[in-house]
Image (cartoon, coloured by chain):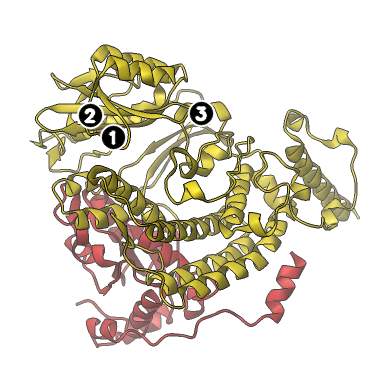
Amino acid sequence: MALLSDINVQGQPVEGHRPWPRVVVTAEVWRHAANELAAGRATLFGLWGDVGTSYWVHMALIAPSTNDIAVVSLECADQTFPSVGALHRPAIRLERAIASLYGLEPVGAPDTRPWLDLGFWDVQHPLGARIPASDRRRAYEFLPAEGENLHQIPVGPVHAGIIEPGHFRFTAGGEAVVRLEQRLGYVHKGIESLMAGATIERACQLAARTSGDSTVAYGIAFARAVEAALHVEALPRAHYLRALMAELERLANHLGDIGAICNDASFALMHAHCGILREYVLRAADAAFGHRLMMDQVKPGGAVNDLKSDGGSRIREAVQHIKQRFPRLIELYDNTASLLDRTVATGIVRPELARQFGAPGHVGRASGRNFDARKSPGYPPYDTLEFAVPVLTAGDVDARVWVRIREVEQSLGAHRANPRPHAGRADCEPAQRYGRRRRTWARRRTWPRRRIPRRCAGLGADRRWAYRALSSARSVVVSVASA
Amino acid sequence: MRRTLFESLTHRPLMEKKPLPDDAALAELAASVDRVARRRLGRSLAIREVDAGSCNGCELEIHALNNAFYDLERFGLRFVASPRHADVLLVTGPVTRNMRQALERTYNATPDPKWVVAVGDCAANGGLFAGSYAVAGGVNAVVPVDLHIPGCPPSPLQLLKGLLALLNNGIRRS
């Protein structure tokens, strides 16, 4: 990749930086890198502050074509650095966090409001100069929305549901939300400062509690960082155990999410059944590793516990159970017109937005971004495992559900047992996605194509199919009502 | 859907047997049973969950209480959306400084009689996160706590035992 080699040539390489190269650059090269981000020739992978003998900002870049990674570092002599957010919007929040935590000023930044620091801490810039906070409790300025008959709806930080806190400021004109601004950082616990100077054991525990949903993933990420720094590699069996735990975690999260999405669309039946499957996964994890969420099971250099004696069979049982039950739930999802009405063409993340922000995970993969950290940069044992990375392009809630469904199948190893041509295909006809197509009341009539609403005309075949099913369902309801 | 619904009529329920209330939790609760409060509440409690800074691990297990295995509602315990409808605040996490005021306000918005249950090891004293510039400490540092359910995170069964102990021994705060 020209850009990264370009920057590598122009910067001063840092010796012993692993696993990816790091170069110290001048402000000019820093700005050049920001320009490359804005032009889409590189994706922002990370942007963070640092303090040692002096202040630094670091930026990780990834080349979209080759997935090469490089880190550039800029010394902030006068506690300022050229703003990346001025040229590339995805950097804005990261720069606001750097400004709040370290007191480093991004020069030319479009948004200088604090982030994470909500005005309740005893110190200002806790990772930097640690200035005692005095009377700086000034009101946060939400972005303005102007127009007639607009009203604001503040939600949170304590808001309905068993859920993390966050503040959401909706500005609505009737039913249309004209602006939604988030204010987050309520669960900021200062993990970065607690990690500094901690023993590896304690740091490992902190990493595992960054997010309880992804405790294994965080554990693996931290362990890999320590292993890279110390030049050690875990044994193959430990890698396999880590991957087993990571896939169990993925299964549990996806099953929970698929159910929760349907529940949010008022279809509680899916939620109840997905909740049962999720519980099977957690119980199998408990039987195999001694902890339902598998917390503290990954450590640098290996894994903490081997599988318990009956762990393997318990996991196989759970997998078998899900393999039996899950297809019918997908069929239920795919055949419920009232549910699809709320997921298809809803909450669309456009592919260009996913590309610009470098959206990882299933969000990116539902919006056409073919990126999976297990494949690239890749890490053991995934480099030796065969699995497909499902990518869809619609970018709506339905696409994100389908990416999760496909990933559940991949995690279950369904691709080996059942080598269907559709598995992991980029775009496939939903009606054919699952086995024998059942005739349901919603599909007994066929409708001429003119019934497809105009707004769907530009969508793919699968979207149009969904709309046909929906409109026929509505017509049946209407005819029953009139009869 | 018909097949799925029909099956649930013919299949055995997955529900776990009702666990005995946690002995330790019973001991932690004052032994005096408030008959007035119990009569008023009709052995039913409305719970408002407040994440005051947790890693979400406790929330996942609290969520699991609602699944078909644990089915919390059969005991008359249910989650409500507003503290104004709640009898119990189920608070998780070390209380972050950013959440301190929100927790106090939630507590003040909950009508009397009310109980606070702190869930998880962090909620006891801040756990691993104690001492950070962004953490105020355990739940007790901000609002009075009636019962603490330990664990990182506590399993749904541990949560159930603790809540049943609360239900069976509703206490009166002097």
Residue A85 placement: quadrant: top left
Q: Which residue is mark 2?
A: A99
Question: Mark 3 against mark 1, which lies toward the viewer?
Answer: 3
Q: Do the residues at pointers 1 and 2 share their chain?
A: yes
Q: Residue at x 39, y 52 (%)?
A: A217
What type is the residue that disc 3 sits on? Arg
Q: Do the residues at pointers 3 and 1 share their chain?
A: yes
Above/below status of A392 relative to A31: below
Q: Residue at x 23, y 69 (%)?
A: B145
What type is the residue that disc 2 sits on? Ala
Of callouts 2 and 3, which one flags the residue occurring earlier in the amino acid sequence? 2
Above/below status of A412 relative to A26: below
Lateral position of residue A185 relative to residue A213, left or right: left
Relative image position of residue B20 (x, y in whole percent)? 39, 88
Q: What tint does the image give chain B?
A: red
Element type where label 2 sits in the image: helix
- Please give the letter of the chain rendered in yellow: A
Q: CB atoms at circles 1 and 2 under 8 Å apart?
A: yes
Q: CB atoms at circles 2 and 3 under 8 Å apart?
A: no
Q: Do the residues at pointers 2 and 3 share their chain?
A: yes
Element type where label 1 sits in the image: loop
Q: Which residue is mark 1?
A: A115
Relative image position of residue A205 (x, y in whole percent)? 26, 58
Give A150 or A308, whichever is nearer the viewer: A308
Q: Chain of mark 1?
A: A
